[in-house]
Image: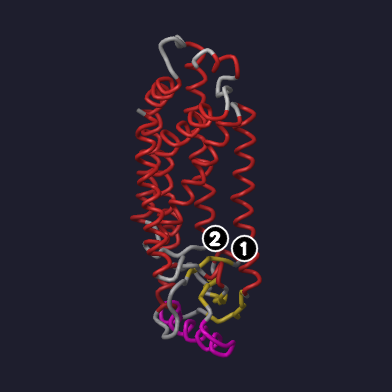
């Protein structure tokens, strides 16, 4: 049953990814934020406690500023605002826009003052892209080694491919709905990688325990995997639901900067629940049948259920 469903779900995933690529390329690709494209950092001293969203809206009211605008609290007692905007032209133009932003902010916070502007060039953005890719790759390799040591190589490959699936689906959703991709999205991806691998380990651990206790004459690999998933399914779904409720609440009631982090997490939890229960184990079983006899429980244990 698991393998049969796996084939159908795989087909749906492929169709979804193809659709995302078509939509993405027709709309200009991913909607990259200034973390990846470059931009400017405008520092404004508010001199009092302030609402980040109110400052952000004041910045967006300036003609010539659009797209990715975010506000980060900084300075002593968090009374400074660092406003990130996309490049809008020359340095003189950026300076003029920054001064207009300060004027708008002063309508809300009269004591606000302009501190300066700093450009984030393409080189820094390129370094961030390289670091982001390296972080995901290194994390995946470490996960593969961990699962390989704890269970076996096929389990590690299945777990890593499931993680790659999760990240690809998250990127596709961001691409289809034109949601901005920045460093926050990278943090969300790494969060989901850790969350998903935990659920996958639970499945493989249950498979190993069942290999030790179930009658090998009654259980083929497919039946063993089915039973292991069913025994772990309630726990996995309950954990995912409780986490999902909290993240959805953050998305509904949080400010814009929180929503940017919460949305990919919501997508990641949903696809991670699927991949850990159906995808990782199915890949392990396919690899086991095609390339070798050693599985989660070790060479001797798997030999008993051939």
User: Splitting the image into 4 quarters, where does residue 31 fall?
Assistant: bottom left
Above-or-below relation of 263 to 288: below
Where residue 263 appears, as percent x and y from the top left, is 40, 54
Where residue 41 appears, as percent x and y from the top left, is 57, 75
Q: Which residue lies under the disc numbered 1?
A: 128
**Dominant SS type (magenta):** helix
Q: Residue at x 53, y 79 (%)?
A: 87
The answer to whether residue 199 shows anywhere in this view is no
Q: Residue at x 52, y 36 (%)?
A: 158
> What secondary structure is found at the residue carrying circle 1?
helix
Cα distance between the residues tagged 2 and 1: 8 Å
Above-or-below relation of 304 to 227: above
Where residue 30 appears, as percent x and y from the top left, is 46, 65
Quadrant of the rendering where the N terminus is positioned: top left
**Residues shaded magenta:** 88-109
> What secondary structure is found at the residue carrying circle 2?
helix
Say which of 125 and 256 sits in front: 125
Q: Please indicate whether residue 98 sits to the left or right of residue 66 in the image.
A: right
Say which of 72 and 35 sits in front: 35
Q: Are marks 2 and 1 in contact (CB under 8 Å)?
A: yes
Residue 221 on the magenta span: no
Q: Please indicate whether residue 279 sits to the left or right of residue 122 in the image.
A: left
Q: Which residue lies under the disc numbered 2?
A: 183
């Amino acid at each position: 049953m698991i393998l049969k469903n796996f084939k159908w779900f795989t087909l749906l995933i492929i169709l979804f990814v193809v659709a995302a690529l078509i939509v993405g390329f027709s709309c200009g690709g991913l909607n990259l934020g200034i973390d990846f494209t470059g931009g400017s950092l405008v520092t404004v001293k508010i001199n009092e406690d302030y609402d980040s969203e109110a400052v952000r809206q004041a910045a967006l009211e300036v003609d010539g500023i659009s797209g990715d605008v975010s506000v980060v609290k900084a300075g002593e007692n968090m009374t400074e605002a660092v406003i990130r905007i996309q490049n809008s032209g020359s340095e003189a133009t950026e300076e003029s826009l920054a001064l207009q932003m300060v004027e708008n902010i002063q309508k809300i916070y009269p004591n606000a003052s302009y501190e300066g502007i700093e450009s984030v060039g393409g080189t820094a953005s390129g370094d961030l892209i390289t670091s982001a890719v390296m972080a995901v790759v290194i994390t995946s390799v470490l996960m593969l080694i961990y699962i390989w040591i704890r269970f076996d190589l096929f389990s590690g490959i299945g777990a890593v491919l499931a993680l790659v699936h999760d990240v690809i689906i998250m990127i596709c959703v961001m691409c289809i709905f034109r949601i901005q991709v920045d460093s926050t999205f990278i943090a969300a991806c790494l969060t989901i990688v850790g969350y998903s691998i935990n659920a996958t380990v639970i499945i493989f651990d249950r498979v190993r325990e069942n290999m030790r206790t179930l009658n090998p004459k009654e259980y083929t690999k497919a039946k063993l995997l089915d039973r292991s998933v069913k025994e772990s399914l309630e726990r996995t779904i309950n954990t995912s639901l409780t986490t999902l409720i909290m993240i959805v609440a953050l998305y509904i009631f949080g400010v814009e900067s929180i929503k940017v982090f919460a949305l990919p997490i919501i997508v990641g939890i949903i696809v991670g629940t699927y991949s850990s229960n159906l995808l990782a184990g199915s890949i392990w079983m396919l690899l086991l049948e095609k390339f070798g006899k050693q599985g989660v429980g070790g060479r001797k244990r798997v030999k008993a259920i051939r």
